[in-house]
Image: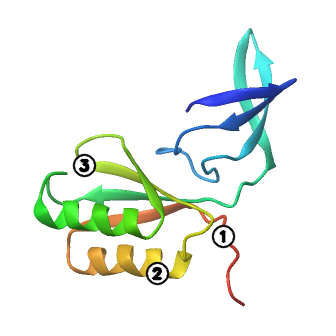
């Protein structure tokens, strides 16, 4: 993960945490130093983003995958490619989390992807 230092042992996460749970882009993180290595300690403040991981059934260039990525971008999501088969989705705070989730769920039902939630930072209706 990439993060910018913003104070003593405090960092702002500057990429989508593809393989971590409980974190999202823009979160403020506290860290400690262990033998001179900076190590994540906890989340100090949330930034309102949500994170999902998609596991592609086809190649990233497949038409159905490209269409899904384009749809997610139109729904106020950023995409971070980890591999040809694993893609992280950063759902920006202004996005409608329910519409994004429905798009992911529909793609999963069609067999295009499998997906999982890394962290939901959006306020949900009760």
Residue beneath disc 1: 122
Q: Is 100 drawn above or below residue 80 in the view shown?
A: below
Residue at the image position 12 percent from the left and 63 percent from the top: 63
Residue 55, percent from left and from top = 30, 57
Q: CA distance from mark 2 to mark 3?
A: 23 Å
Which residue is nearer to you in this view: 86 or 74?
74
Q: How is the image coloured?
A: rainbow
Residue at the image position 16 percent from the left and 67 percent from the top: 64
Q: Secondary structure at mark 1?
A: loop
Residue beneath disc 2: 99
Q: Mark 1 packing: few (<14 Cα in 10 Å), some, or many (20+)?
A: many
Quarter where residue 81 is shown: top left
User: Which of the two discs, 2 and 3, labels the residue nearer the N terminus?
Assistant: 3
Left/right of residue 28 with respect to residue 87 in the rendered view: right
Q: Mark 2 packing: few (<14 Cα in 10 Å), some, or many (20+)?
A: few
Q: Nearer the viewer, mark 1 or mark 3?
A: 1
Residue beneath disc 3: 85
Quadrant location of the N terminus in the rendered image: top right
Q: Secondary structure at mark 2?
A: helix
User: Which of the two discs, 1 and 2, labels the residue nearer the N terminus?
Assistant: 2
Quarter where residue 11 is shown: top right
Residue 106, percent from left and from top = 31, 81
Q: Mark 3 packing: few (<14 Cα in 10 Å), some, or many (20+)?
A: some
Q: CA distance from mark 1 to mark 2?
A: 12 Å
């Amino acid at each position: 993960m990439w993060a910018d230092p913003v104070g003593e042992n405090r960092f702002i996460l500057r990429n989508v945490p593809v393989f971590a749970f409980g974190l999202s882009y823009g979160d403020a993180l506290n860290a400690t130093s262990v033998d001179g290595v900076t190590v994540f300690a906890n989340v100090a403040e949330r930034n309102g983003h949500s994170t999902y991981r998609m596991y592609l059934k086809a190649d990233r260039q497949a038409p159905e995958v490209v269409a899904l990525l384009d749809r997610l971008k139109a729904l106020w999501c950023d995409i971070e490619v980890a591999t040809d088969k694993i893609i992280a989705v950063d759902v920006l705070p202004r996005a409608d989390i329910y519409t994004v989730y429905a798009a992911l769920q529909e793609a999963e039902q069609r067999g295009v992807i499998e997906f999982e939630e890394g962290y939901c930072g959006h306020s949900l209706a009760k």
